[in-house]
Image (cartoon, rainbow, N blue to C red):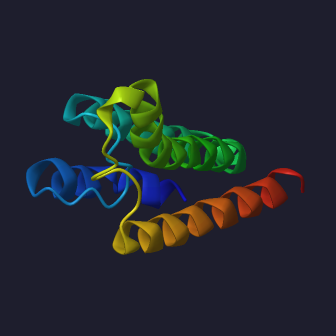
Amino acid sequence: MAAYYLATPVFAVADLGFGYPVRVATVLSSGSRLAYYAAVFALGLLCRARPAATPWVGMLESAGNLLLLFLSILLPIWSLAADPMVGSTGGVGLTPEGAVNALLSGSAMILSFHRSQEAALR
């Protein structure tokens, strides 16, 4: 898992350099995503230095990513509810591609969380 976290600069370049946010929900601004990538890289260094902490780090990172995924879906819906006078729902909600992406990435995050939890309790 440490290697995955230490590979974060590759994901940061794909996202911030080429516009492919494959690792973090697009709910974050580019500055916030840069901070996210720095934090995840720091988690990789922590996992490398303290291997016993790796399952706990995995649980924390999975839970944080699930929160970001939920927010990327819910914030547009909540913003519509905040202004009922808008009258149009155009552009709010998941596209079929977005729904598939959310389903796949959410499933991977939940699986990662449970695997890390299992390893932490051993």
Name which residue lies at 74% across and 64% down: 115
Q: Determine the residue positioned at 59% across, 60% down.
A: 109
**Camera-side residue of 38 and 26:** 26
Residue positioned 30% across, 30% down in the render: 32
92 lies left or right of 82? left
Position in image of residue 3 (x %, y %): 45, 59
* Residue in view at x 34 percent, y 57 percent: 7
Name which quarter of the figure residue 118 lies in: bottom right
- Compared across the picture, whether 77 is left or right of 108 comes to left
**Is 95 placed above or below 81 here?**
below
Point out the image quarter for the C terminus. Answer: bottom right
Can you give x and y, in whole percent of width and height, for residue 97 in the image?
35, 73
Depth order, front residue of 82/5 = 82
Seen from the viewer's position, the closer of residues 52 and 120 is 120
Q: The N terminus lies in which quarter of the figure?
A: bottom right
54 in relation to 42, above or below:
below
Q: Against 78, is 51 above or below?
A: below
